Amino acid sequence: MYGTFAKIIVLVGLVILVVVFSVDPLIAPIKSDLAFSTIMTSLGGVFVIVVLVERVTEIAITIWRQSDADQIKTEIENLKGDPARVAELLPKEKFLASYQAETKSIALLVGFTISIVVCCAGVGLLGSIVEVSAGTGNINFLRGVDILLTSGLIAGGSDGFHQFVTTLETFFSESKRRMENRV
C-alpha cells in the first residue's frame, strides 16, 4: 500500500513539473564546442570522486553494521555444525538476508547523502555539457538538476559508473564510425 501511494505521489509531482515547464519552458542548449575529450575529462574527475565516496561509505557501513553481521554469520555456522539445531538455521539465514538487504539500503542512502554534499560543493557534470547564460534565468534550476543527476551517478558506485562510461564511449564511437562511413 505504502509503495503504491509513494509511486502515485511521485508520478503526480512529475506530471505537475512537466506541465509547469511546458507552459514556461527553460532553455539549456548543448554547448556548441563540446568535444568527446571534454566529456571524458569531466567523467575522469568524477570517477575519482566515485571511488572516494564509495570507500567512505564502505568504512561507515563497516563501522556501523559489520560486527552484527559477523555475529549472525557465526551463529549460522554454529547451527550448521549442530544437527540437533538445524530447525533454527532457516530463520537465522532469513534474518541475515534481511539484515544484508537493510545494510545495502543504508549504504545507498549514506552514499547518496555524501554525494549530494560533494555536488553542493561544486562538483557537477551538466555544466560541462550544457550552455547556460546568466540571462536565461534557469541557472539555479539547472544546478539543482545537476546536483541530483551527478549525485545519483556518484552514489551508484564504481560498477554503475563504469557501465555508464562504457555506454557513453560506445555511443560516441559508433556515432563517429557512422559519420565517417557517410563521407
Image (cartoon, helix red, strand yellow):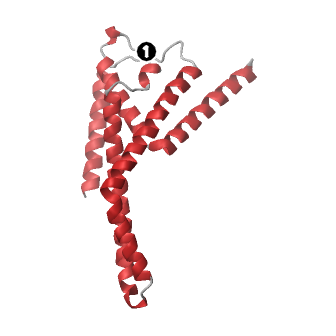
Q: What is the x, y in percent for residue 100?
A: 37, 61
Q: Which residue is mark 1?
A: 131
Q: Is residue 105 visible?
A: no
Camera-side residue of 132 and 104 = 104
Image quadrant holding the N terminus, namely bottom left
Please name the residue shown 40% across and 26% down the image. Answer: 124
Please name the residue shown 55% across and 35% down the image. Answer: 165
Q: What is the x, y in percent for residue 150?
A: 40, 32
Q: Amino acid at mark 1?
A: Glu
Q: Is residue 30 visible?
A: yes
Instruction: Say if 89 sits above or below 72 in the image.
Output: below
Please name the residue shown 49% across and 34% down the image. Answer: 47
- Crowding at mark 1 (Cα within 10 Å: few <14, some 14-19, many 20+): some
Camera-side residue of 15 and 32 = 32
Tell how many labels. 1
Please name the residue shown 35% across and 69% down the image. Answer: 71
| Figure quadrant of residue 93 | bottom left
Q: What is the x, y in percent for residue 16?
A: 27, 33
Image quadrant holding the C terminus, namely top right
Q: What is the x, y in percent for residue 28?
A: 40, 18
| Figure quadrant of residue 73 | bottom left
| Figure quadrant of residue 37 | top right
Camera-side residue of 73 and 36 = 73
- The outermost residue toward the top is 135
User: Horizontally, is 2 left or right of 127 in the view?
Assistant: left
Numbered disc 1: secondary structure:
loop
User: Horizontally, is 83 left or right of 167 in the view?
Assistant: left
